[in-house]
Amino acid sequence: MLSHRGALSAANLKAVGLAIGILFSVGSMNLVAQDVSGTWVLSVNLGASGAGDATFVFEQDGNEISGTYSGAVGEHQVSGSVEDGSVEFHFEVDQLGLVSYSGTVTDTEMEGRCEYGQLGSGTFKGSKRP
């Protein structure tokens, strides 16, 4: 029998193969995009500039999201992305400039920071309607 220090036995080789298979399985679970499709109501707080609720209706294709915003600054088309529990989306308002949201998302909850152009920045938190 030929032996070499550091060589893998058949049993060790199987164990290494199993470990690699498990790592690939766990790693590939993170590649699936969080599903944010549906209607979300987010409470927005811009401090001195005011607070209110914004309604977003999202559609999703892979990591890309699109949809509509309805709230204090009218109705607008939205685009953005979601990946590994992080979400970002934005839309343009003629009088304000770029409005953007970025934060974290679970199956039914979303929260983070938002920028409302000239109105300033703030926070948002909300949930997905059933």
Image (spheres, helix red, strand yellow):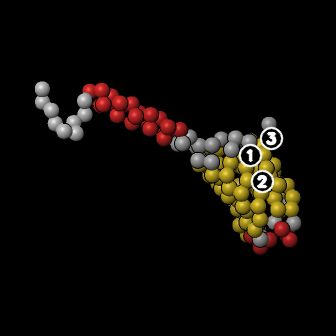
Q: Is residue 11 left or right of residue 115?
A: left
User: Whole-percent x and y of residue 34?
Assistant: 63, 43
User: Whole-percent x and y of residue 126?
Assistant: 79, 50
Element carrying mark 3: loop
Residue 103 position by quadrant: bottom right
State which quarter of the image contains the C terminus. top right
Going 44% across and 37% down the picture, which residue do you hit? 24
Determine the CA span between mark 1 and mark 3: 10 Å
**Cβ–Cβ under 8 Å for marks 2 and 1:** yes
Going 82% across and 55% down the picture, which residue do you hit? 43
Q: Bin the neighbour count of mark 1 within 10 Å (Cα to Cα): few under 14, some 14-19, many 20 and up.
A: some
Question: Mark 1, mark 3: which one is toward the viewer?
Answer: 1
Going 87% across and 58% down the picture, which residue do you hit? 52
Residue at label 3? 129
Q: Is residue 62 left or right of residue 27?
A: right
Going 56% across and 40% down the picture, which residue do you hit? 32
User: Whole-percent x and y of residue 125?
Assistant: 78, 53
User: Whole-percent x and y of residue 91?
Assistant: 71, 60
Residue 22 position by quadrant: top left
- First reached walking from the N terminus: tag 1 or tag 3: 1
**Cβ–Cβ under 8 Å for marks 1 and 3:** no
Residue at label 1? 109
Q: Nearer the viewer, residue 38 or 122?
A: 122
Residue at label 2? 125
Element carrying mark 2: strand
**10 versus 101 height, above or below:** above
Total labels drawn: 3
Of all residues, the one furthest to the bottom in this rendering is: 118
Determine the CA span between mark 2 and mark 1: 8 Å
